[in-house]
Amino acid sequence: GVSRHPRQGVLTAHHSTHLTSIFSSGQLDGARNLLAVADSGQLDSLQQARADLVRARLAFVRRHGNDAAPLLLAAARRFESVDPTLARETYLDALIAAIFAGRLAGDCGVAEVAQAVGGCVRPTPPGPEDLLLDGIATVYSKGFSAGLPGVRAALHTYGNGMTIERELRWIVLACFAATRVWDMDRHTSLSQRYLQLVRDTGAASQLPLALSSRFVPLLFTGEFDEAARTAQNMCTAIDAMGNAVSPYSAIALAAWRGRHVEMEALSARARRDAETRGEGHGLTVIAWAESVLANARGNYRAALDAATYAASCRDGAGASGWALPELVEAATRTGDCAAAAAALGRLIDSTTPSATEWSLGLEARSRALTTAGDSAEALYVEACERFIRAGLRPDLGRAHLLYGEWLRRQRRKADARTQLRTAFGLFESIGMEAFARRAERELLATGETARRRSATASYVDLTAQEVQIACYARDGLSNPEIGERLFISANTVKFHLSKVFMKLGIRSRSQLPIALAQRGVTEPPIGLPTG
């Protein structure tokens, strides 16, 4: 180490350690000041690498953009010849930064960092953080199956024998790794540990990421009230630190709740901010959330576009993989068999070797969508059973919904009602409003009656299917688009619309909004199905 005072323009190992504590406490101005002092002097190669490390970590904490990863990668390469341990630590930081940069990483993405890790000296025996670095680097450089054993070993041992400071520094990467290998149980325990460490140590700069990590299992298990509190706490923490990062948790929750207006308002600003900062991960999360909401509303072409974009970033964290089941569903509903098969193939590349209840449940549900004939039924049943064991209620509801839709197309209306009632009940209890409406529309199509919100609603003598078609036509959907949502032909839609016009005493679609409003019809109501 160099012993000169930092006022002489030298950044020592001691000052690097001091800067770590400054980062943890959220005192970012102090980090910038010390960095400015160091930059004012003549730096040798090691000192320059330390300065780059500080600058990159400062950039990442404040922006989560694409400016940190190149600096970290350059610093790690400089450290290799003088301090291999510090090189590996910096590669871990570079992986985190590259994951957040995602599709906007440019020439320094996850693949580039992973490739560079391969030439770094590995200690013997490796610690948990070494297993994590090598495992993730192998996943991105040599393929999922090649890296899976190393990632699992890292997740199993992460925290063992590590100082609190080291455990806290890379635990967000461990959380990313857990979702990457479809291990919700380990992600849950790691995220709980992450948040506890932040609170115990007062590491304010880590609080937004800790809350974001904790949010993920709350969303996927359907604990929406707690997820909402966590998302709000995340927004508060971001505001308190003055960070230029976006509330992606709130966007995802709005999508799963089916709150279209709220999600669009949040997404518009977040998308602009992410593009400005270079946070490609955020763009992927937004697109995945859009695909979920579009599938919930039966807008399968929009879901196909959003899911295709989200899944196109193969170097991202969880959201790019989560988009694949959305893509399979949207593609099958729009008749794009090639896109569905390609998405299923990519999904299977990670779900089959992971072999968790979560991964195999998604695989079974997606396989069922692409399977012709009676063989699909066993896959839907398998998906439901796996999601029950995993405690993933939103995905369970969606499996029952798809199973019910499949049964209706097989003209097994009584069996379809059983599945659709189950799906509707789950969605209502969780708070998945758009999926609940989709399940109810399916129930109405089977002849199921529903308890209405208001006694003033009057459907005259329209049938349940005619009400659905009339509402879709009022909202501007074409006959083919309505047919896609209801699994009927465009000609059948045209026939039903002619009957709707006759019953309502109108001549054109432009008259539908007033005619339906006069009769209290806004949309097929959300209510507890009966009968």
Image (tube, grey):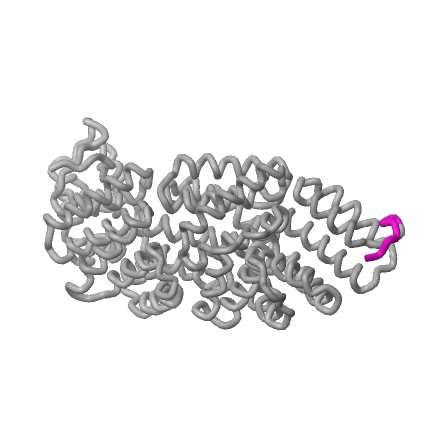
Camera-side residue of 323 and 462: 323
User: Residue 375: x, y in percent?
Assistant: 18, 64
Measured along the vertical axis of the image, is residue 352 above or below residue 401?
A: below
Camera-side residue of 114 and 287: 114
* Residue depicted at 48% across the width and 39% down the height: 231
Measured along the vertical axis of the image, is residue 345 above or below residue 101?
A: below
Q: What segment is highlighted magenta in the picture?
A: 1-7
User: Residue 445: x, y in percent?
Assistant: 16, 47
Drawn side of residue 495 relative to residue 423, left or right? left
* Residue depicted at 49% across the width and 64% down the height: 150
Measured along the vertical axis of the image, is residue 116 above or below residue 193?
A: below
Is 6 magenta? The answer is yes
User: Residue 310: x, y in percent?
Assistant: 44, 58
The residue furthest top is 455
User: Residue 132: x, y in percent?
Assistant: 54, 60
Does residue 343 show up? no
Camera-side residue of 283 and 371: 371
**What secondary structure is the magenta-colored segment mainly?**
loop
* Residue depicted at 62% across the width and 49% down the height: 163
Drawn side of residue 159 relative to residue 493, left or right? right
Is 374 magenta? The answer is no
